[in-house]
Amino acid sequence: MEFRRPIFSEVLDRMNEPRRFIQVLAGPRQVGKSTLMDQVLADCQLPNYLYNADGIDEEDTDWVRRIWESTRSQMDTRQQTEAVLVIDEIQKIRNWSEIVKREWDADTRSRRQLKVFLLGSSRLMLRKGLTESLAGRFELIRLGHWTAKEMNDAFGWTLDEWIYYGGYPGTAAFVKDIRRWRKYVKESLVAPAIEKDVIMTSNIYKPALMKQLFELGCSYSAELLSLTKTLGQLQDAGNVTTLSSYLGILNECNLLTGLQKFANDEARRYQSVPKYQVYNNALLTAYRGTTYEKDRTNTNVWGRWVESAVGAYLLGGADEGGYKVYYWHERSDEVDYIIVRQGDVVALEVKSGRRGMNSGLPKFRERFNPKRDLVIGTDGIPFADFFNMNIEDLF
């Protein structure tokens, strides 16, 4: 039986319910948006029309209108009272949101029951049109990186394999050949994401600097590195402000972020040294790992991978859970991750082979009085349980 992600049922339910809003299925590259939609359409009993903007000239802004009008014509010819229109890779068409708004409103006025689903890259899509032109007209369905359970159900991966190889389903066939696996991640996953989703849709004046920052940030996942020191390791000239803005764009693409230090003062958070964190551990392994067997048996190295996996899992649920992720560090005291939602603070310390318990958690508890402070791993919540839990339950 073909594997279906848990979100399959939600998307199918949205497709079968009465027409109310444009449904937007958004997520990073290669997490299965198109595959999921194919599965849903196969189970949906409504007539459906699927178009893909990949390969269409981005300046051909009339393309959206043409395919929309073609769908209407076919509905009329076939006497269909309702249907589903799906447009994949919609963000590749310039000014797509304005045209979608016009056509959607026209259908609304004429009471045409044409349900619309748009697929595209994660928060870049939001920033480039949804919140500007389509405010109040859409619902967002987030599709994130694959979890440990999903990779186990689909490919039989162990938890350790997921921690090391991450959650890209397309890489599963190559895990026995690390050179081929690493080449696939860099050339088939990272390169298109950086060159198409980032550079072509954002104001990137130094593409080479952006790529260097990404690779360096991935290799430092779960570690602190000031932007000033980061500059010292990059070949292309730049400044801290440029690096900060590029890091923000990478975060919008669900690739790499720089976590801020937790503080009661917002200004101190913004000025803090970033803790680099990948959204998918495959990116850490691709730019820093050696082999699974070698890294897994090195206690200190493996502890780094586990901590990065915890951070990636927290980031993966942040948007849906409505919380933000930070770290805390003061002199020799540190807490790996701090999550905050509506004023509630939960402190999380990752305890594995990388290092034993430090004094950071009790010091943080004494200073900030969090709602909860927990250990993930040894003498705390087992990793197998943590990576299967709903992070919102921690609040």
Image (cartoon, rainbow, N blue to C red):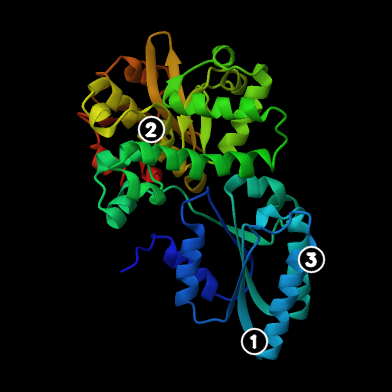
Is residue 262 in view? no
* Residue 339 vertical placement versus 316 (above, below): above
Q: Residue at x 51, y 28 (%)?
A: 215
Mark 2 closeness class: few <14, some 14–19, many ≥20 residues within 10 Å:
many
User: Circle 2 is placed at which residue position?
Assistant: 285
Which amino acid, by three-letter code, is at mark 2? Thr
**Secondary structure beneath label 3:** helix
N-term-proximal mark, 2 vs 1: 1
Q: Are marks 2 and 3 in contact (CB under 8 Å)?
A: no
Callout in the foreground (2, 1): 2
User: Circle 1 is placed at which residue position?
Assistant: 81
Callout in the foreground (2, 3): 2
Which amino acid, by three-letter code, is at mark 1? Thr
State the residue in front, 182 or 160: 182
State the residue in front, 124 or 287: 287
User: Circle 3 is placed at which residue position?
Assistant: 102
